[in-house]
Amino acid sequence: MRSARSLSDKRRRVILVVLVALAQLGSACRDNDAAATRTATADGGERSINVAIVGNPQMEDIAALTPDLFTAHTGITVNYTILEEQALREIVTRDVGARGKQFDVVMIGMFEAPQFGKNGWLVDLTPYATSDLDYDVDDLIPAVRKGLSYDGGLYASPFYGESSFLMYRKDLTEAAGLAVPDEPTWDEVAKIARALDSEDTAGICLRGKPGWGDLGSVFTTVLHTFGGTWWLATEDGDIGAAQVDQPEFAEALNFYVDLVNDVGEDDAANASFNECLNQYLEGKVAMWFDATVAAGLLEADDSPVKGLNGYALAPTRVTDASGWLWAWALAIPQNAPDKETAWEYVSWATSAEYIEAAAETLPGGWAAVPPGTRRSTYENANYQAAAGAFAQKTLEAMVAAPIENPGKMPEPGLGGVQYVGVPEFQDVATRCTEEFSAAIAGRESVEDALAACQVIASEVSN
Amino acid sequence: MTTTHRERVLTGETVWGTLTLGLTAWFVAAVFFFPVFWMVLNGFKEEADANASPRLFFEPTLDRFREVTTQTPGLLGFSEAFLNSFWVVAVSTVLVLALAIPAAYALSVRPVRRWRDVLFFFISTKFLPIVAAILPLWIIARDLGILNSHLVLIILYTAMNLPLAVWMLRSFFSEVPRELIEAAEIDGTGLWGQITQVMLPIVTPGIAATALLCVVFAWNEFFLAVQLNPVDASTVPIWVTSNVSTRGNFLAKLSAASSLAVLPVVLAGWLAQKRMIRGLTMGAIK
C-alpha cells in the first residue's frame, strides 16, 4: 500500500515538474508576443491585418522577417495563419466567396486567381500595381502575370512561382554514355530512364499519389503534350463532353503507368513531390520530372547530390512546350475592410525590394529567396551565382509554359497546363487519380481506371 | 500470491493459453505503440535522417523541438496554441459534465418518461457526419460574430461530447445500488444531496473516465477548429499542421510538434490511469 502511494506521489511530482516547465515556456513566449505587439504600437501604428498563407519554406521566411522589415517601418502588425495546402484552399474559398471577413490578404494559387477574379471575389490590383512605382508591375514575369489575371485585370500578386522541368543525374547519364537533350521528348526520356534503371537506382520518379495537385498535376501535364484533354469546351467555353475515353487519353495514361511500373520509384502509388525529392537525394532515382523549385533543394549546401545534376525543359510529345506554370500569390478579398493597408503589405511582400532584403537577411542568402516572380531576380548577378545551375532553365521553362493553349484541343474555363481552369477539375481529378493510382499500384487495370474516370468526368459535362 | 497449478486448472487456464494471450497482448501493444515511438524518435532527428530509409542509429538533436517552439511575432506559436486549447478543452469539459450529470441522473436513477427514446435522441445527434453540417455552422458562427473565438469551439465541443458523456455516465449511475438512494431519501436528503453526497462519491471514477475522454476528444479535434477558428484563437492541432510544408521535408519538425501536442493528453491519461480503468470497466459488468 505504501509503495503504491509513493509511486502515485512520485507520478504526481513528475507531472507537476513537467507542467511547471511547460507553463514557464509558455509565459516566456507570451512575453515575447507582448513585446512584439508593444514594439509595433510604439512605432506609431495601430493597424493590423490577418494574412492566410500556405506552409512552404519561403512563406515561413517572410513571416519571420515581417516584424523587422515591414512592421518596424509601417507600424502595420501582420498576423499570419499558416495552413496546410488543402485546408487553405477550403477556408480561403469559403471566406472570400461567402464574405467571411476573416482575412485581409489571402494566398491563392494560379488555379484560383483568375476564377476568383471572374467571380468578383477579389479586388482588381491593377490600379494599385500600376500607380505604385515601388511595386514595378512591369518587372513581373509576363507569363506569371498573365496566369494571375482575368480579362486584363491582375487579381493576385505573385509571391513565388515555378514551372516544371526534368532533373537528372548528369554523372549517371555520362557514365552510361547517354546525353539528355535540352528539349527532350517523352519517348527519349523513357528510353534514357530504361537505360539508367538498375537494382539500386530507379530510372525515373513520377508522382503516383492520388490528388489533383499530386498525380493530377504531373499526369495532366503529360496528357496535354500527348494531345489529350479532360473535356472538350462547349461553344460558350463551358465543360463539354468528357474525353477520358479518347485514344490520346488512353495513350497518355498507358505510357505513364507503364513507365512508372517498369522503371519508376519505389512505392510509386504513394509518391508525390516530397517522396520523389527524398528518393532523388538518396540516389535512388536517376531522373525526376517535377516542379522547378526542387532544383534549389537538390543544389542546396547540405544536398548529397549537389553539383551532380542536369536540367532539361519539360519533355514533350505532340506539343511544342509542356512545362507547367504555378504561382502562390497574394490577393485582397473584395470584403477586406482596409484595402489600402492590405495593398501596402501585398506590395511590400511581393516586391523586388523584399527579395533583396530577404537575400541579405536569410541564412540561405540569394538561394533562399522566393523564385519565379520577377525578371530582376534572374538578372541579379548574386542570384545567378547562387542558383546558376538551374536559374536560367527555370526562367526558360516559365517563359515557355503554354498556359493558354497547353494541348491540341480547346479546353473549357481558364488556361492551365497541369490542370483545367474550371472549379470542377479539383473534384474530378482527385477522384480519377485515385483510380489511376490504383492502376499504378497494380490493383486495377488501366482500362478499368479509364472507364471509371470517364463516368466521373461525364458527371459535370454540359 | 503466485497461482498454483490447481487454481489455474480450476479457472480453466493452461500455461500455453496464458502464454499465447500474454504474447498476443504484447504484440498488439507493440503494434499500437510503434507509430508513437517512431514519431517521438523522428522528432530528435535531422530532416534528412527522418526522411531517409529507416535507421535506428542516428545523432539525436533537439533542434526540431527548438524550431517548433521558437516564437515568431504574428505567427501562431506553441504557447499560444496550448493556452487556447487549454481554455477551450477545460471549459467545454466542465460544461459537458455540468449538463451530463443531471441528464444521466434523470435517465438512470429516476428515469423520465420514454427515457429510451431520449437516450436514442442523444446518440442520434452523432449520426450526421460533421462535414455535412459545417457550412450552416460556419454561417451561423459568422452571423453571430463568433468565428475565430474560443466561444465557438467551446459550444461545439460541448455539443460534440455531451451525448457520449450522457451515455457513459448513465451506465455508471445505473451501477449505484438503489437502496443507498432510498436510504438517503428516508433520512430526508434532498435531490441535490442525493446526487452530491451519495451518487457522486461512488461514480467518481466513472466521471473521471468520462472527463478524460472528453478532454482527449476535444484536445485532438481538428476539423471544426480549422474550419471555424483558424485565425485568432487557434488550437494545438492547427499549430501542428502549420509545420507541414508543400515543398521540402517536414517530417522531423512535424514529429517534434506532434510529440509536444500529445504530451498533455498522455500526462492526463497517466495521472488518471487507475481511476480511468476502474471507470471504464465499471459500466461493463452488468
Image (spheres, rainbow, N blue to C red):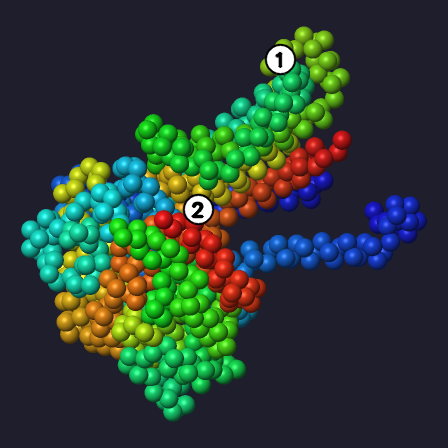
Q: Position of residue A58 (x, y in %)?
A: 28, 60
**Identity of the amino acid at label 1?**
Leu
Q: Residue at the location (19% across, 59% down)?
A: A146
Compared with A387, A448 (above or below) is above
Q: Calculate the distance from the C-alpha at mark 1 to the C-alpha at mark 2.
A: 41 Å
The residue closer to the viewer here, A414 or B23, is: A414
Q: Position of residue A409 (x, y in %)?
A: 30, 63
Which residue is under mark 1?
A: B191
Q: Position of residue B77 (x, y in %)?
A: 35, 47
Figure quadrant of residue A3: top right
Whether residue A459 appears in this view of the structure is yes
The residue closer to the viewer here, A75 or B273, is: A75
Question: Disc 1: which chain?
Answer: B
The residue closer to the viewer here, A280 or A419, is: A419
Please state which of the two labelled residues, at mark 1 or mark 2, is closer to the viewer.
2
Q: Earlier in the sequence, mark 1 or mark 2?
A: 1
Which residue is under mark 2?
A: B237
**Identity of the amino acid at label 2?**
Pro
Disc 1, SS: helix
The residue closer to the viewer here, B80 or A48, is: A48
